[in-house]
Image (spheres, grey):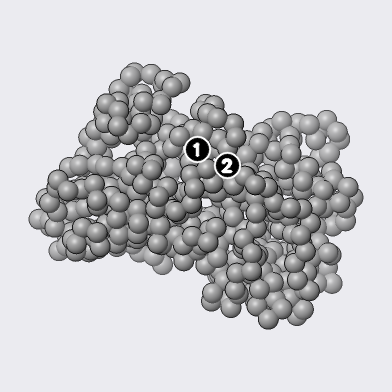
Amino acid sequence: MSGIFGAISKTDCTEALFYGTDYHSHLGTEYGGMAVLGDDFQRQIHNISQGQFKSKFYEDRRKMTGRKGIGVISDSNEQPIYLNSRLGPFCIVTSGLIENKGKLVSDLLKKGISFSEVSRGAVNVTELIAKLVSQGDDIARGIEKMFEVIEGSCSLLLLNEDGIYAARDRYGYTPLIVGEKDGVWAVTAETSAFPNNGFKINKYLEPGEVVLLTDSGMARKRPGRDINQVCSFLWIYTGFPASDYEGVNTEIVREKCGSFLAKHDKDIEVDIVAGIPDSGIAHALGYAIESKKPFRRPLVKYTPGYGRSYTPPSQETRDLIATMKLIPIKEIIENNRIIICEDSIVRGTQLKNFTVNKLWENGAKEVHIRAACPPLMFPCKFCLSTRSISELAARKAIKNLEDRDPEDVSEYIDNTSAKHKKMVEWIRKDLNVTTLRYQTLDDMVTAIGLPKEKLCTYCWTGECPGKGRCSSKK
């Protein structure tokens, strides 16, 4: 998932664009980009894998001038893309995941349409989306046609002489929210970008909705759809604590998740409650409030130097960040029975090698892991949250228990079944912890507070909106 932001004003928008985009730095680690339209398009893209967005773009923002602009923190592709199309020149940023990219690229090549941007040896997804949009009779119709042919998800911002077109994915997996202050309009993937920049929320875009922002306001170009399948993982892990999605705050949901975990823990005695920084902290606070056990910090994150170990694409980079970012405090760990709240267990390797081991090495008496969501069973098809079945901890457990990769894992998904309990026990032993418990799907949905049918829970259930169970193979 990438973070996208746009701003449009009657005066220069670059300051608002720079700071608004920076507030999405938790969503990507590869590239940052900004495009501003004044007398002409000005565009800058930097690799941010070894540096923060602010430092990379600090000088650029002083040189770029214009009344409207878009920015992105990207998890994989270099963005924004500039295209001088038959609909006129535009810049575009995107967030999502296109499952049928190969077929779409092949179809366009057969039509004589070429591609110039490359990302890791393949066509840049944002350029693909730009070429698809340019097939329409106008920008709004082009976006609509793009929605019709892609499999996966795509939310986007498109900057041209008209203003900023904002389009939310047709199933609503990734959010877009419009804000306004004193005649300045903005659109964001994270509402946490608004308060310190002075914006107030004006509208949560509906799935499939397309709007045009100008310095005069907002105009709807395409209506939204009734179906909504916003990604549940936003509240559990991906999103920023201060952000609201569909009007529901992330920090509050995480506290509720922790509270539910504590309610099921009446059979163990512990000395302290802790969360793995940063996203596990709120889950742990909820657990501590409910259990009335003290919240402490046996592991602290060196925030200035290391971001999320989950988002970088290479395992080597993820392991390095996981090794270096968490610093143990022996005086808090030693001789204590510790509850550790984690947002999720994806691969389990970092939790085992770089978190649990640090606790044992510093004298923990017991280590109890509590995951704020159910076991992840399927690689994400919509937001690049998880990448393959083989690296999921739950699937590794199932393969070891059955000596194969079964097609039907429904019994393992059912948290009341014997197979589910065996799977959790295998993971517990592999992690080398005293006890392990996962959140139930029902409790997670209740914590979020939206109807289950309005949430995407594919990575836990394998079910797609309106399509039943999806293929789990990749």
Residue 160 visible, this angle: yes
Asked whether disc 1 touches disc 2, contact meaning CB atoms under 8 Å apart, the reply is: yes
> Residue drawn at (69%, 72%), measured in percent from left and top?
185
* Disc 1: CA contacts within 10 A as few (<14), some (14-19) or many (>=20): many
Q: Is residue 183 above or below residue 103?
A: below
Residue 402, x across and y down, in percent: 33, 19
Q: Amino acid at mark 1?
A: Tyr
Horizontal relation, residue 437 to residue 310: left or right: left
Disc marking residue 458: 1
Compared to 417, does 447 lie above or below? below
Q: Residue at x 66, y 36 (%)?
A: 151
Of residues 406 and 404, the one drawn nearer to the viewer in this rendering: 406
Residue 184 location (% of width, % of height): 70, 76
Q: Is residue 229 left or right of residue 9?
A: left
- The residues tagged by marks 1 and 2 sit, at their Cα atoms, a distance apart of 9 Å
136 relative position to 277: left or right: right
